[in-house]
Image (cartoon, rainbow, N blue to C red):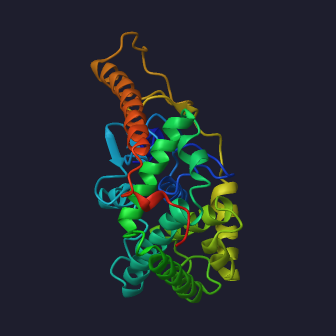
Amino acid sequence: MEGDQETEVYTLVARKPSFDLPTACPNCLPAYIYLKLAKLPFELAFNSTFPDSDELPYFENGTYVAYNNEDGGVIEKLKKDGIVNLDAQLQSLPEYLSLKALIASWLEEALTYEIWVGTEGISTSKIYYSDLPWVISKVLFYKQTYMAKNRLGITKETAEQRETQIYKRAGEAYEALSTRLGEQKFLFEDRPSSLDAFLLSHMLFIIQVLPETSVLRCKLLEHNNLVRYAEKLKAEFLEASSSSPSPPLHSFPSSFTRKGSKPKSKPKVEKTEEEKKFKKRARFFIAAQFLAVVIYLSVMGGGSSDEPEYEDEDD
């Protein structure tokens, strides 16, 4: 088994690094930290071909692939399939279940709100769209903002009420987590769990990505023990074990060349049908985005009064 473990090549494919984080994507960072907490050797590769794809991050090992948009996400898939499960002895504990609900609902909701609404998407361009033409990046930003508001149940009539509720819940969640943590190293004493991965990624994103004016950031910084917790784990698991990541990927398929991986017996010169298919998909994506720009400009030009979701003014 040990010999097999040494030859295993695990790869996490994520969005690119930024803001001094190994990946600045709030969906990718928990998976990265989870693998670090589990001390599972893996390569990190980047994919910016489809900036709004919900498949990222994904985890690869040979023909095995765990996608973000399947089976509850990468971490849940890895646990379910026995690749790595930090929660095996914790999942039936009432405290585990209540903390998981708190982090997965109130904190995830608050972060989504703060990224797309609270800070008006000030950080999103660098995370998702920096490689795209300005017009296309704007269209995708408005699309994601619209979708985020729909998920959060935000309309022009409910905007103020939902904002108050979201920030209130986030404050209560930080208070509960601060009390639970105390001065422990992890949420469950000396045992790391997936909840530590989610909480740590949440905190690092807020502290390092969101602007100082962020309401959520201010609420988090009120809890000194949570900040110390994030600093210690970051130093131990992210900074101490950091290594040079693989170069960016330029295509979305799960089969790609990794830097540092052992070369195959003989590289293939001709492209496979799958590679041709994905190259076509990339061209279709660009065409679809161009069409989206045209449609968006025509709709905006019509001056419709039924789309208040992008308004900044308060009534």
**What residue appears at the point 33 percent right and 19 percent down from the top-left corner?**
276
Up the image or down, 66 lies above or below 115; here it is: above
Q: Which residue is outermost to the top?
A: 269
Left or right side of 30 for 282: left
Q: Which residue is outermost to the bottom?
A: 179
Residue 66 in percent (x, y) is at: 34, 48
To which quarter of the image does residue 271 belong? top left
Task: Compare residues 273 and 189 and report the one nearer the observer.
Answer: 273
Residue 74 in percent (x, y) is at: 38, 54
Task: Compare residues 258 and 289 and report the one nearer the observer.
Answer: 289
**What residue appears at the point 40 percent right and 33 percent down from the top-left corner?**
294
Left or right side of 242 for 87: left
**Residue 287 in view:** yes
**What residue appears at the point 50 percent right and 71 percent down from the top-left corner?**
110
Residue 154 in percent (x, y) is at: 40, 69
To which quarter of the image does residue 146 belong? bottom left
**What residue appears at the point 49 percent right and 77 percent down from the top-left corner?**
160
